[in-house]
Image (spheres, rainbow, N blue to C red):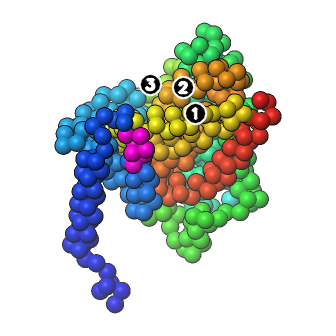
Amino acid sequence: MEKMNEPSKKDLIKQNLIVYGILLAAFFVIGMLVPENPTDFGMLSVIPAGFLIIFIFKTKRIVEGLTLAIILCCIMVYKLDFLVAFAEIATNTMMNEDIAFLIIVCGLMGSLVAVIEKNGGGFAFGNFVASKAKTEKASLFGTMLCSALFSMDDYLSSLTSGIAMTPVTDRHKIPREMTAYVIDTTAAPVSVLNPISTWAVFIGGLMVANGLAEEGQQLATYVKTIPFNFYAILTLIVMVLVVLGVIPKFGPMKAAYERVAAGGPLAPPGSEKIDIRAGQDMVVPENPKLRNFFVPIIILIAGVCYFDFNMQIGVILAIFLGFLFFVFQGMDPEVYAEAVIQGLKNMLLPILLMILAFCFADASEQVGFISYVIDLAVRNITLPLLPVTVFLIFAATEFIMGINWGMYIIAIPIVAPITLALGGDIGVTIGAVAAAGVWGSHCCFYSDATILTSASTGCDNFRHAITQLPFGAIAGIISAIGYLVLGYVIY
């Protein structure tokens, strides 16, 4: 009887068409009512961001949500020429160096995983670690350590530790949501606290560019901001307490554990779409060799370090030398090429999500969303409230925009002169900005951190974000209270 009451595929298509038709009609009404000049949008600039968050929470459809939010922005600014504007935003995004970098890195990391799996390296590594980490807690702490070891770059950390440790946590029947939470919570927070990471180099360089540090002293200046990155420190503490069981698993994460305990799958439904392994079980080879895992990964890390933390060159080097390494062992070159292509295919959805996130960030900027929110926040700001205001505003905008380092490019030139004009400590303010970027990226449903961790662990990105968000919120709230207290103590 239940199946008879379920709507048919044709009925679902009709329902979806009606819903999207109503949404587009509403978009046109909004677009026609807003002013011609984007600088006059005011509070109306918040509409696309508000729509996106509500749509994602209601439908769990992130690709459609981002696409519709971009269309709404285009209609608001360009009216009936919205399709031309949409095409221009897409073109500009695809020509962006950061997107080209992401496509190459993510695509070829998918290829590297496919090649390692094809040669039994992943299976051998899983056997090796499983023999050492014999409990759930031990495997999760091992996952933390693995992620922290690669903390010179958060992409390297998320992708490599996800690839290495997911098979291990799977053997202990740990939900993929928990594996993704541990990896994501270790990657960016440890990277931003590491003074020799790509994060430190990037933010330190921005401090030099904005006159906050002397040339050659960017890392020394950046180190002074690290103690004030409350979120990065606190979220690591919260994660350790969750793994130890001091903070109980609750909400969506508790539901994930209940699913597995009831005999359900380790990965939530739909995870195969974003899984770097395409949702396939690990192949059990006849004679798995540990070197088939370690050699490609060592080449990758050595290449990244040798070429000044350039992940793109590192992964290209790993694919090139991996070909020589595996063919020398007897692998057919055509089979190697097929594995590389299959790995690229497996990363199509993660790449698409990141492209759409960048497009949405561009479109939101055109409706003046960031300018409006920042202007509203700093209009009557006082010095004691500066740290907490900076943290909350940029955490919120990063959570909505998902632009990662792009937020730092926007934020630092804004907060630096305000801090100096009010007589504040620039180390405190930049520490709050850095913390805001980590929180927003950490908890955003479509940020690069969320997407790459979801891909490497084979966990649906909505489920990863929604299970991680409560624990991120705990650290975020405590951080905000810390900045509020700090502001009144030092000022």
Residue visible at 31% across and 80% down in the picture: 6
Residue visible at 50% across and 39% down in the picture: 373
- Decide which of tag 3 and tag 1 comes sooner along the chain: 3
Q: Which residue is mark 2?
A: 414
Residue visible at 50% across and 58% down in the picture: 463
Query: Given the current orientation, which residue lies at the most extreme bottom position?
Result: 1
- Decide which of tag 1 and tag 2 comes sooner along the chain: 1
Q: At numbered mark 1, what does the secondary structure look like: helix, strand or loop?
A: helix
Viewer-proximal residue, 403 or 326?
Answer: 403
Question: Which mark, by number, is residue 313?
Answer: 3
Main SS of the magenta segment?
A: helix
Q: At numbered mark 2, what does the secondary structure look like: helix, strand or loop?
A: helix
Q: Quadrant of residue 382?
A: top right
Q: Which residue is mark 1?
A: 378
Nearer the observer: mark 3 or 2; the answer is 2
Query: Given the current orientation, which residue lies at the most extreme top position?
Result: 215
Range of the magenta residues? 41-47
Tag 1 near tag 2, CB within 8 Å:
yes
Residue 32 counted in the magenta span: no
Q: Amino acid at mark 2?
A: Ile
Q: Is residue 13 above or below residue 107?
A: below
- Label 2 crowd (10 A; few <14 / some 14-19 / many >=20): some
Q: CA distance from mark 1 to mark 2?
A: 10 Å
Viewport quadrant of the N terminus: bottom left
